[in-house]
Image (tube, grey):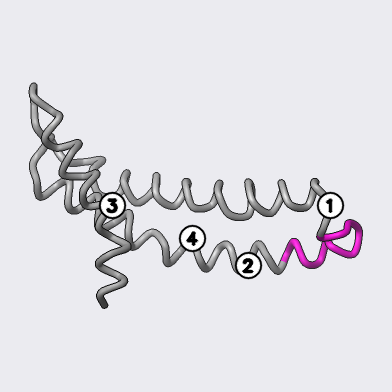
Amino acid sequence: MFLTGLALLPAIALVVWIYRQDKVEKEPRGLLWKIFLFGVLSVIPAMILEIILDEVFLVFMVFMDADTLCYVILDNFIGVALIEELCKMKAAKWAAWKHPA
């Protein structure tokens, strides 16, 4: 539990810092924490999609070696980064899209 809190500390510090930097029209704290929570929970679908896509990439490993630059780029940028960022974007959109603030 301590390590989980320690891992979340930088993200929480960033949320607090961004909130304090906004001098003009602050968003409601509840909305910011809701978006933060949805972003944290977006790890679950991202993990599931990454596992599925990793299995798909394993099928294509018949055609290319896992040590090649092409495979590493495909796996890291498509299989991991793109999926994680799309899941976070969708989570933030769900949390804040219809909110008046």
- Rounded to the nearest angstrom, the CA distance separating label 3 from label 2 is 29 Å
Disc 3 to disc 1, how far (Cα)?
A: 34 Å
- In the rendered structure, which disc, 1 or 2, sits on the residue that comes first in sequence? 2
Q: Earlier in the sequence, mark 4 or mark 1?
A: 4
Q: Which residue is mark 2?
A: 52
**Quadrant location, the C terminus:** top left
Q: Looking at the image, how many numbered discs can be counted on the residues?
A: 4
Task: Check disc 2 and report its element: helix, strand or loop.
Answer: helix
Determine whether label 1 and label 2 are within 8 Å by CB.
Answer: no
Q: Which residue is mark 1?
A: 68
Whichever of callouts 2 and 4 sits on the residue coming sooner in the sequence is 4
As helix, strand or loop, the secondary structure at mark 4 comes to helix
Q: Amino acid at mark 4?
A: Ala
Direction from residue 92 to residue 87 in the image, left or right = right
> Can you say whether 57 is above or below 17 in the image?
below
Where does label 4 land, which residue? 46
Q: Residue at x 78, y 52 (%)?
A: 71
What amino acid is labelled 1 in the image? Thr
| Residue type, numbered disc 2 | Ile
Residue on which disc 3 sits:
10
- Which stretch is magenta? 56-66
Q: On the image, which quarter does residue 61 sit in?
A: bottom right
